Image (cartoon, rainbow, N blue to C red):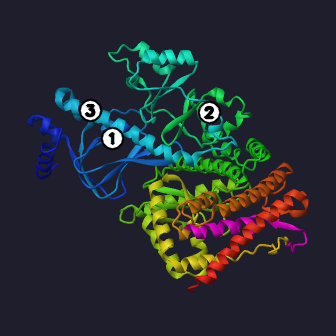
Amino acid sequence: MSNLVYTELKHLLKDYYPFTLLTDFQLQEMTDKATQATFAQNEFIFHEDEDADHIDIYFLVSGLAKNILHQSNGKQLSLRYYYPGDIIGLMVMFTSGELEFSVQALEDCTVFKLNKRHFFEIMTRNNDFSKVIWESIGERTKSLYDEMKNKATHDDEENVHLLKTRVKTLMNQPILIQPHLTMDKAAQLLDEKNVSGLIVNDEQLKMKGIITNKEILKYASQPSSSNLVSDWMNKQPYYVEADAFAFEALSYIKNKANEFIPVIHNGSAIGVLTSRSFLNLENSSYLDLTYNVKNSRSINTLLQQSSLVNTTLQSFVQELVEKESYAYEVSEVITNHNDNIHRQIIKLAENEMKAEGYGTPPINYCFIIMGSQARHEQGFHTDQDNGVILTNYYHLPNRSNIDEYFKKFTQKINHYLSLAGFPECTGGIMAKESKWRKSLSEWKREIQTWKDELDAQEIQNFTMFYDFRPIFGDFSLAEEIRDFLTNKAKKSKTLQQLLMKDALRFKIPAHPLGIINLKQKNKKINVKKTGLTQIIYSTRINAIKYGVNEVSTVKRLNELRKVQAMHPRDVENAKTALHYLHYFRLQQNLNQLENNQDVSNEINVYELSKEDRIKLKEALQVAHRMQQVTKISFNRNRVV
């Protein structure tokens, strides 16, 4: 390192706490061992796949960076930012084996690399410096766990696996204890009430933590000057919301061996779940659906989990349908299963890229899905609609290598998805196509082009892309695109009018008086093109108009009710119609699978019972009315 750089580093460190605690000799030792490095925007300063033993500590001189936690479900969480003067890598210094997080440059960054081994040696010789570093690590650890808990609460909704039953119908009454009471009192309550846990709450009845036998044992086996509940309680217990589905909590109990789960509503514990809460739920083998997918270590093994061949999933869906679950929620079961298959395929494809010498993904990316999968509305008949959002990388010197990496990577993903029962999209809406694999800036320019040119193809592209959802990678990329897309669409009245016109392309075979018109000789009706499409399109147009960010049609309807864009009665009618249409499609798919037939969205009306024909007619009438309302709105507000 040149004398000029050495002087710059020494000057910087001398002004930054806790380096001010070092002696002049120790400061000189540290700067002598240091080297300067730069990282371009979006480059990784270090990645989770690197050996922790070979990563040094970085003193950030200029720029901005972020910490990324890699979760097992494929999603990444950004848990903190690093600013000039921050030390990057303190947590890594005491990590062995594989990392669970990476650090990425958000701007062009300049750092000084401080030798980790020498840094530790100086800590052993300077107690004041060492104490501050250890306190910093402790604070960062607590901050990370707090952030993980807060973000996981929101993210859990994306991974719900449904049973018909909601947890609030299974929960037991909670036994409460206040944090200022003693552990002896807690043990007494556990014994008297014959329960496995207590909820610790404050005066406002907000949950602060839990006490179980585990905490009692710790208290009994670890001498301490404190016997207060507040000092021994588990402050970050796993919990579920009152409206969560039982499948979520039951899966956690089975796989995590947790015997006590609080049920929360608005921050207060209104009940508890234990393994005994689920004694009346049958077929717990269904819980292995997720486990088997996530533990598939090869493509051939994973292919056996495809919804078209997985008889356990098919039996699960059949049972939910027979128990009169809402069919759109049963469709969410299938979608969640398919999401897990997608994530596992992406992980296996990444491993293959490493094995073939391509290495880890050179930049952050987000894999997105579109269409019915994005809306959580899949049946057993579905093809691929997916894409990739890449972090901006054209300013990087290795951009051609990045292009080649993701071209090869996405080809693998689309190929393996095809083998797993998701046929390639005939319209080419797949990540391996350059049109659907773009950087953040390119996607924004593409959206602007769709908005400005407004021809038939651009409108259809916009319609397809608007219903997108991230399932793997850096979700912040998708969130930025979602905000940009929603803002552009909400402000463009012309675009909204053209989307309305596009929604009128598919006609409902229903007479205003309620007679179903079936012109086909075979008396079959495609419930996706005739019924579901009209409700989905009409709901989407209103969601665009009112800036609703939800993708699921049911969630969009609920939000439109909240903003008073739709009457509550009309929302319930639309949801009931969705239930009927999804039900008929699922029942048809299950019959086709049982008879080894190709699955489709077509049903024969005259094979339905009289009662079901009435339900189908009612559903089509609702879809027809929603289409007519759209048409009237289009004519009244015509601007093109």
x, y percent for residue 549 = 52, 61
Q: Position of residue 430 (x, y in %)?
A: 60, 63
| Label 1 vs 2, first from the N-terminus | 1
Disc 2 is placed on an element classified as loop
Nearest to the observer: residue 575 or residue 373: 575
Q: Nearer the viewer, mark 3 or mark 1?
A: 3
Mark-to-mark CA distance, 1 and 2:
48 Å
Q: For marks 3 and 1, give the CA distance.
A: 21 Å
Circle nearer the viewer, 1 or 2: 2
Label 1 Cα neighbours within 10 Å, binned few <14 / some 14-19 / many ≥20 = some
Q: Which residues are magenta?
A: 517-543
Which type of secondary structure does the marked residue at label 3 adopt? helix
According to the picture, the residue beneath numbered tag 2 turns out to be 171
Which residue is denoted by mark 1 in the rendering?
55
Pointer 3: what residue? 135
Q: Nearer the viewer, residue 327 or 557?
A: 557
